[in-house]
Amino acid sequence: MSELRIGIAGLSGRGLHWIRLMQKLKGYRITALCDLRQEALDDGLAAVDGEDEQACFRDYEEFLNFDGMDAVALVVRSEYQGALAAQALEAGKHVSAEVPAAHSLDECWRIVLAQERSGKVYHLAEQCRYAGYLDKWQELVRGGDLGDVTYAEGQYLHYYTRCMFQDPHSGALFGVDRLPEFPDAVAAWVNRMPPIHYVVHDLSPLLRVLDDRVVEVIGMSTDSPSRAHPEILSPDMQVALMKTEKGAMLRLAASFAQPHPENDTHWQQVIGTKGCVEWRRALDDAPRLWLADGEARDKQPQTWGFSKDQEPEEAKGSGHWNLDFYVHAAFRDAVLYDQSLEFDVYKAMDVAAPSILAADSIDQDSRKLEVPDFRPNANRKKGEAP
């Protein structure tokens, strides 16, 4: 296979971004487009450059039956995202899927089993884990500079009210201020989803740095609807406490309905028995490091950033601090060149499942829940249901 023939399902703004980016990367050829709305299909076709023709579908099953594509780029935001990914794997297609992967444990297991049985590549397109500063943190943890990690935090606080509602006719997304213009408005995906489901963008980086997985989770939430904007169903803040297999405690928080400063929206810190690191707390701040055996009495500013030490030219302008490049390059290389996928289906579920269970815990009066290990073991052979 000299090129990856890919079909893109979900042609909203994010889907159009994927079209533009994949056309710039070597190895991709867009051969099919899929969306429920004809207007979205027209937008997708307009975004594709070149003379190649793209097959267009408004039915997902017909799209999956198209034999002119090898893989599906799933850029769909809905409660059915996990089922759609599993369905594509079951149809014999490789899958690159937008976060958060799934919204139930059943969907997580269906994805895992479909990948194991088909042998196709499943990749969760979570880009924050590729940040350059995480390379530095990983080196510190692996080298023992921080000692045994006992605690870590991650949060995704993003004032995202401009996309909380959707016009069912045009598909347009808008905020509270424009509700009078759209009498038939419905809650958009981010307004229906428990905010903690989307904390995968910060759990993913932390688990990469720690080389660990979550085994227990407890969730808590403010009440619904939002206190900042009562028109919004989503609660203002949700928090999860987690414990990992290696014994570290994690705190993850997510919020999309209440105002927050316009900064990076993501923040993490890692604390160990011999030192600690943290990402910058504001745009004019710096990431910081403190080592117990050093001379400094407080955390010292560092020059770490999102960029890697050696950043490919193709990465520049790819989006999300140039990190979107690494998502699509990793998927391409795994399918075309049979390169090992570091963020495989099991690690993808390691970040999806705790987030899902945090919301389940909230629904069960913050009861502690156990997180399954999706890897084959003595009690479950590859391809067998648990």
Image (cartoon, rainbow, N blue to C red):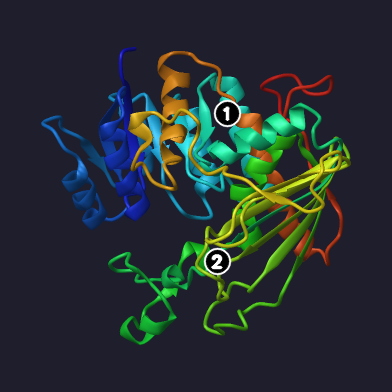
Q: What residue type is labelled 1?
A: Ala
Could you tell me which residue is drawn at 41 percent across and 24 percent down? Answer: 332
> Observer-nearest residue: 301 or 283?
301
Question: Which residue occupies 59% across, 30% down?
Answer: 343
Query: Can you name the residue that lies furthest to the bottom here?
Result: 180
- Front residue of 96/57: it is 96
Q: Nearer the viewer, mark 1 or mark 2?
A: 2
Q: Disc 2 designates what residue? A: 192
- Tag 2: residue type? Arg
Quarter of the image where one finds residue 111: top right
Give the residue at the far left of this rendering. Answer: 51
Image quadrant of residue 72?
A: top left
Residue 75, horizontal then vertical, whole percent: 41, 46
**In screen coordinates, is 54 left or right of 375?**
left
The picture places residue 355, in percent across and down from the top left corner, at 69, 51
Q: Quadrant of the C terminus?
A: top right
Quadrant of image for the N terminus? top left
Q: Where is residue 248 in the image (x, y as percent from the top left)?
A: 85, 43
**Measured Cα–Cα span from mark 1 to mark 2:** 27 Å
Q: Residue 188 carries which label?
A: none
Q: Which of 33 and 156 is in front in this view?
A: 156
Q: SS for tag 2? A: helix
At horizontal 54% and vertical 83% (from top left) the residue drawn is: 229
- Mark 1 touches mark 2? (CB < 8 Å): no
- Vertical side of 38 occupied by 33: above or below: above
Residue 96 at x, y percent in the picture: 46, 34
User: Could you say which is closer to the camera, residue 181 or residue 384?
Assistant: 181
Residue named by callout 1: 114
Element type where label 1 sits in the image? helix
